Image (spheres, rainbow, N blue to C red):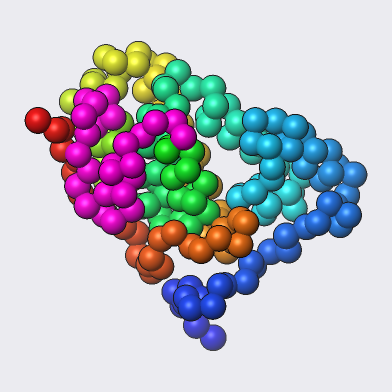
């Protein structure tokens, strides 16, 4: 038995590895969590919560933590979503990319930047703050470290709180990506998967500042 197979189910859509519960299959505790998610800013329960709901205590904590990091950090929504896209592309996480490419577009991130990240091409930024967040996220994802210069740039612009929150966003959306990948949670709305399948982590190129 090969326990290290990297088979991805490419071709026909891969089936989820955990049950995706209907509301009539949920326990009262699971249903309470489901209903609180629906009533919150997400508006629907998709993505990793479909797996986490099998551990209701985990799902409740996950939902509150994720809601804070997605909607309530000190960073503008555009920058938050940019960091999430870098995480999603690094891990080739179909659902993460599907949800947050649209969220980034709605937040005002340049569509050319989104396309460049999806295609693993050097993104060109017109805003230095965007370039800083891209590089901070890219380096932390790919090297596990950030330089003194990058850390200082984020801290100078957003304060210690901003640097701490950005790092937490990156860590949280890494958890989201690996959860989605491990359990093969499907892209919602029966949409096509937006990213090529990959059996390895994706290295993204450095960004550039226009001009």
Residue 67 % position (x, y): 60, 31
Question: Which residue appears farthest toward the bottom when viewing the image?
Answer: 1
Q: Is residue 6 left or right of residue 67?
A: left
Q: Is residue 24 highlighted in magenta? A: no
Where 1 sits versus 192, above or below? below
Q: Which image quadrant for residue 126?
A: top left
Question: Which residue appears farthest toward the left when viewing the image?
Answer: 211
Q: Point out the image quarter for the N terminus.
A: bottom right
Residue closer to the observer: 34 or 103: 103
Q: In this view, does 137 lie to the left or right of 6?
A: left
User: Which residue is at 82% across, 45% downward?
Assistant: 30
Where 9 sits versus 124, above or below? below
User: Which residue is at 38% across, 65% downward?
Assistant: 196
User: Which residue is at 64% across, 49% downward?
Assistant: 46
For the record, the magenta segment spans 106-131
Residue 130 % position (x, y): 28, 29
Q: Point out the image quarter for the C terminus.
A: top left
Q: Which image quadrant for residue 24?
A: bottom right
Q: Is residue 103 left or right of residue 211?
A: right
Residue closer to the observer: 139 or 46: 46
């Amino acid at each position: 038995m090969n326990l290290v197979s990297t088979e991805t189910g490419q071709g026909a859509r891969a089936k989820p590895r955990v049950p995706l519960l209907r509301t009539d299959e949920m326990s009262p505790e699971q249903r309470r969590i489901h209903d609180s998610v629906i009533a919150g800013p997400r508006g629907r329960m998709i993505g990793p919560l479909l797996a986490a709901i099998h551990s209701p205590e985990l799902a409740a904590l996950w939902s509150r933590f994720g809601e804070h990091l997605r909607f309530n950090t000190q960073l503008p929504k555009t920058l938050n979503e940019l960091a999430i896209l870098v995480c999603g592309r690094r891990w080739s996480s179909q659902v993460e990319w599907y949800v947050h490419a649209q969220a980034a577009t709605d937040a005002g991130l340049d569509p050319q930047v989104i396309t460049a990240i999806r295609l693993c091409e050097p993104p060109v930024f017109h805003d230095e703050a965007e370039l800083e967040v891209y590089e901070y996220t890219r380096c932390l994802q790919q090297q596990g470290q950030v330089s003194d210069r990058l850390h200082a740039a984020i801290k100078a612009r957003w304060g210690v709180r901003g640097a701490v929150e950005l790092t937490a966003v990156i860590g949280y959306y890494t958890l989201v990506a690996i959860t989605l990948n491990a359990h093969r949670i499907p892209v919602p709305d029966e949409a096509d998967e937006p990213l090529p399948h990959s059996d390895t982590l994706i290295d993204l190129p450095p960004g550039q500042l226009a001009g």
